[in-house]
Image (cartoon, rainbow, N blue to C red):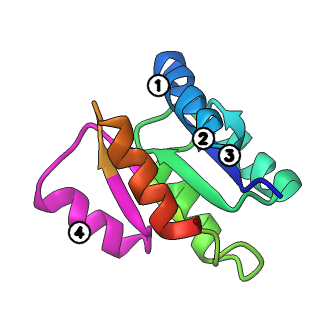
Amino acid sequence: MKKKILIIDDEPDVIKIVDFRLKSAGYKVNMASDGREGIESIKKERPDLILLDIRMPVMDGYEVCRRIKSDEEFSGIPVIFLTASSGATIKDKVSEYMADDYIIKPFDSENLLKKVKNLIG
């Protein structure tokens, strides 16, 4: 059975690129364009992994991650932040919000696939 990945990002170009790379690698992909939509999709689809943008309208990625990781039913789902930020700040936020990893935009698609495989195979 294909592993399911949810992309939560408000940038259509990022979603297209990530969707293509993940589907090409054999994953099933669902998408949400803001945090609230992402939370609803998590409840319905129960993804194996979440790729989560930080800066989004309605609800930012930090709040989405906080809600996922504080919910016993979903806390085991790995979360990878997608961010334009770099440096110590993002590393602190990954730890603070209990995300599993991060990828800095623009990103190398091979690095993306490597990080996904490390978390869900």
Q: CA distance from mark 1 to mark 2?
A: 9 Å
Res 120 seen here: yes
Provide the residue span drawn in magenta. Answer: 81-102
**Label 3: which secondary element:** loop
**Label 4: which secondary element:** helix
Asked if the magenta segment contains residue 93, the reply would be yes
Q: Nearer the viewer, mark 3 or mark 4?
A: 3
Instruction: Find residue 104 and report its horizontal and vertical position in percent.
Output: 27, 43
Query: Pointers 4 and 2 in contact (CB under 8 A)?
Result: no
Q: Which mark is residue 7?
A: 2
Q: Which residue carries the number 3 mark?
A: 27
Res 62 seen here: no
Q: Residues within 10 Å of mark 1 (few under 14, many from 20)?
A: some
Instruction: Find residue 41 and report its horizontal and vertical position in percent.
Output: 78, 47
Q: Which residue carries the number 1 mark?
A: 14
Name which residue type carries label 3. Tyr
Name which residue type carries label 2. Ile
Image point 30% across, 64% down: which residue? Answer: 93
Q: Which residue carries the number 4 mark?
A: 92
Instruction: Find residue 37 and report its horizontal and vertical position in percent.
Output: 72, 39
- Label 4 vs 2, first from the N-terminus: 2
Query: Pointers 3 and 2 in contact (CB under 8 A)?
Result: no
Q: Residues within 10 Å of mark 2 (few under 14, many from 20)?
A: many
Task: Give the quadrant of the N terminus.
Answer: bottom right
